[in-house]
Amino acid sequence: MPEDDLVVATKVRKEFGGLVATDDVDFTIPRGAIVSLIGPNGAGKTTFFNQLTGVYKPTSGSILFDGTEVSYLPPHTITKLGIGRTFQNIRLFQQMSAMENVLVGMNCRLHSGILGAIFRFPKVKREEEEAREKARELLVYCGLPRRHHERSGSLPHGDQRRLEVARALATEPKLLLLDEPTAGMNPQETAEFTAFVSKVRDEKGVTVLLIEHDMKVVMGVSERITVLEYGAKIAEGTPAEIRADERVIEAYLGHGVGQG
Amino acid sequence: MSSVSERARGFATGPRDKWIAPAVIVLGLLYPWYVEALQALPLIGDFIPSTESMVVMVAFTMMALGLNIVVGYAGLLDLGYVAFYAVGAYTAGWFASQQFDQVTFSFLSSVPDDQPGIHITMWLVLLVAGFLTLFAGILIGLPTLRLRGDYLAIVTLGFGEIVPQVVRNGDNFFGFDLTHGTFGIAPIDAAGFPVLASFTSLPKNFQTSPNRAMWFYLGAFALLLITVFCTVRLRDSRLGRAWIAIREDETAAAAMGVPLMRTKTWSYAIGAFFGGVAGAYYASFRGGAFPADFYFQFSVFLLCMVILGGMGSVWGVIAGAMILGYLDREGLATIGSKIQDAGLEFDPTKYQFGIYGIIIVAMMLIRPAGLIPERRHRIELEEGVHDTPFYDVQLEGTLTDRDRTDD
């Protein structure tokens, strides 16, 4: 694995009024790694995600992605630089087909404009055909071998999760952010999905940042884990180190067993 | 193969679709030739719109299709679309009338060359009007499209009021008569074929031609065909997908790399373009641009057409626009006279907006997606044959399970 870091976040702080959602978080993601971000509910994990993807601007701090400062860029520019994401509560374009969802993901990699759309120059036609072919392959790759032309909102939950990943991969990301991807999946689906994440990393060379509550997934798949509590980083290390860390155990178990 | 056709049934109506569009085009094109035969029919004859009314209905349909790009595709509620109609109509006034009689300029115009004012052939003016309106759309769009939902609607409402006010009071624009105030600009030159007329039987000027309504209708119909063609092509393009993605989920669209501002502004600008062209053509047909036409109700009227037909659905919007356009032009008056013939004192034209309101409420209750709802999936299904090889790849069991979860 290469030594350099794909993401270097320094003292990332986000305040919503008086609430400090992320409290001077330092965070690095090595290129090619699978890194997990865990913590009790409300710890600031998704807020951190949203700052990485440009949905929120940090109050202070800096986020370097692949050498570029991204903390003040709009989301679509960040996506173009190579960060693809999924959402905690599935946010597909429900009225569009699975295929179209993936094609929207490719939006920033395609070039046709208005005149191209109206006159369908050979170049545009070719681009469109190639995009569709690629989308088809991507859907199959993500475990959606069929029903590409159905309304995505009518797909089963597990397939919608898979489709979100396919759509994120369509943006050709260097870094793939997965926000609680196994939420609502049954154990078998979860196991399949965990294997799939490793496969994507190995085959596509994508770095993965995962927010996850299922400790089995986190411990099984990640090379490094960062733990947030009340917006602050309380621990960072390998799964074995995290499992033994007292502050983590306290954060998770101290306030009452099983209640995050 | 079989699974494709099975699923196709859910969305598409099958081979029937293939000849609907050509049939409608041919029927539409030939309308002036059989309208009199239809009007001679017993019972329904009185309800057949004249070619003259059809010109207006077709112009309204173009505007509705333009609005559909903004409201239906990109999901941006625009309550000030009438502003674009105004810009289009006044562009026609500026470039094809005696408004600027300080200069005498003529270019392939249907009026004599020695008339004062700028007189450019209407076909070119339509294009100019389209682009000026497109530019106006960008100007209005840039500051307003940062807003979402209701806030956007309120600001567009504001612009829909500003433009007519400017037009009404533009007779002394820093000492310059830009719009001729409440009188409006009239007469505006008619469309025509001044060059071709010299060696063909085409009319030099539609307005003075004995088949005035027919020629205006054919011109409007041609413009409508172009509009439909462009809207359909745009819908199925990269840009169209980006619009619909924004409509479905703005945050997700941005996260997938869709530049929100640029994409929204384009929807606004292109929607405006068609409104401008239609406005200019309609002004040429009416022979003038009058500030009294650009009232807020007209924006709502166009919006009703889009909602009635089915937001985002090209066929639906055409149907909705033709129906409401018909009621506005002739339908209500015809129905009213029938009611009065029956001895009742009731004039539906007095209550026209009430009636449109009732139609919309009824639609929302009975068929909220519109008369002909948008079908995003048909084109996809026609191409869907490519999928076949992938079907047998996966486990049989899971597939049938998944199929059952269909909505």
Image (cartoon, coloured by chain):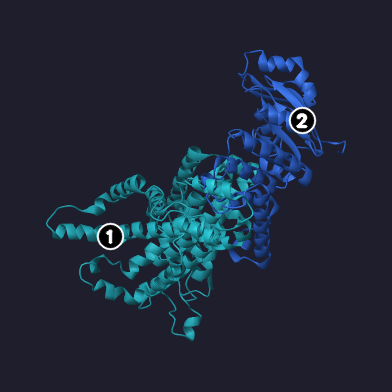
Chain colours: A blue, B cyan
Q: Considering depth in this image, is A172 or B74 the residue closer to the camera?
A: A172
Numbered disc in front, either 1 or 2:
2
Q: Residue at x 65, y 64 (%)?
A: A125
Q: Estimate the x, y position of residue B204 in percent, counting from the top left.
A: 44, 78
Circle 2 crowding by C-alpha within 10 Å: few under 14, some 14–19, many from 20: many
Specify the farthest residue to the bottom.
Answer: B199
Give the Cα distance between marks 1 and 2: 65 Å
Residue on which the image places disc 2: A62
Label 2 sits on a secondary structure element that is: strand
Specify the farthest residue to the right.
Answer: A3
Badge 1 sits on which subunit?
B
Q: Is residue B99 visible?
A: no
Q: Estimate the x, y position of residue B280 in percent, counting from the top left.
A: 46, 62
Badge 2 sits on which subunit?
A
Q: Estimate the x, y position of residue A126 in percent, counting from the top left.
A: 68, 64
The label shown at residue B331 is 1
Q: Tell me the quadrant of the picture where the N terminus of chain A can be found.
A: top right
Q: Estimate the x, y position of residue A234 in percent, counting from the top left.
A: 75, 19
Would residue A113 appear left or right of B315 to someone viewing this image?
right
Q: Tell me the quadrant of the picture where the C terminus of chain A can be found.
A: top right
Q: Considering depth in this image, is A186 or A37 the residue closer to the camera?
A: A186
